[in-house]
Image (cartoon, rainbow, N blue to C red):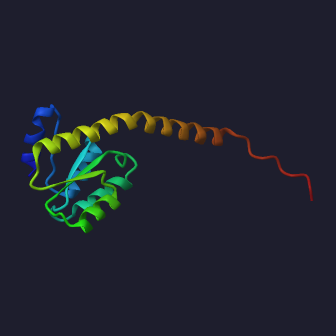
């Protein structure tokens, strides 16, 4: 499936990295900071929902779009994925044109929201620095 996805996205001229397990995927996401994560729900040792939750909880990578790939059309699995933080899903068997459309849409969304997120972090940093540099309140002279 990893090779299929990589080959399907080749016409998009994207750099695609793969991981065999959820743990490896989280490590790769932390190291590479990709623009998008394609996440299969069925993986050895750690399922895709758990990986999705772990990514969302991480401050460094929690903002990246996640596209869940699932062989199940179970509403429960899809709902669990979306609740865990997935942005979209695609069902197997995968239509390569649909995959490319969804990937392009999520990448466009990310590139539009990245500047906003950077600005929010900048404002938070300024507030924190401002709070740290403010003098402590003067003691009250009232009894």
Q: Please report the residue visible at 15 percent of the width from the left and 31 percent of the height from the top.
A: 13
Side (left or right) of 117 relative to 123: left
View extreme (top): residue: 13
Horizontally, residue 66 falls left or right of residue 17, namely: right
Q: Which residue is drawn at 36% across and 54% down?
A: 56
Q: Which residue is drawn at 10% across and 44% down?
A: 96
| Residue 109, image quadrant | top left
Q: Relative to 118, is 77 on the left or the right?
A: left
Instruction: Indicate the quadrant containing the C terminus: top left, top right, bottom left or bottom right.
Output: bottom right
Q: Can residue 64 be seen in this view?
A: yes
**Residue visible at 19% across and 60% down?**
41
Residue 137 picture location, percent across and down: 78, 47
Q: Can residue 35 be seen in this view?
A: no
Q: Nearer the viewer, residue 106 or 135?
A: 106
Q: Is residue 8 above or below residue 13?
A: below
**Where is residue 110 shown, x and y percent of the image?**
33, 38
State the count of labels: 0
Q: Residue 45, located in which quarter of the rendered image?
A: bottom left
What percent of the width, then of the height, locates residue 63? 37, 46
**Residue in front for this viewpoint, 13 or 47:** 13
- Comparing 14 with 133, the one in front is 14
Nearest the camera: 83 or 20?
Answer: 83
Q: In which quarter of the image is residue 40?
A: bottom left
* Residue 118 sits above or below residue 66 on the image: above
């Amino acid at each position: 499936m990893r090779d299929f996805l990589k080959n399907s996205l080749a016409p998009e001229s994207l750099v695609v990295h793969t991981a065999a397990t959820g743990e490896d995927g989280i490590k790769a996401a932390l190291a590479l900071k990709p623009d998008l994560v394609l996440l299969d729900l069925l993986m050895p040792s750690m399922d895709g929902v758990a990986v999705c939750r772990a990514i969302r909880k991480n401050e460094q990578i929690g903002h990246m779009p996640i596209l869940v790939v699932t062989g199940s059309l179970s509403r429960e699995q899809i709902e669990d994925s979306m609740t865990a933080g997935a942005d979209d899903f695609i069902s197997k068997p995968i239509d390569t044109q649909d995959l490319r459309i969804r990937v392009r849409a999520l990448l466009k969304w990310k590139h539009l929201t990245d500047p906003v997120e950077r600005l929010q972090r900048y404002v938070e940093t300024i507030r924190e620095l401002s709070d740290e540099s403010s003098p402590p309140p003067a003691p009250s002279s009232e009894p």
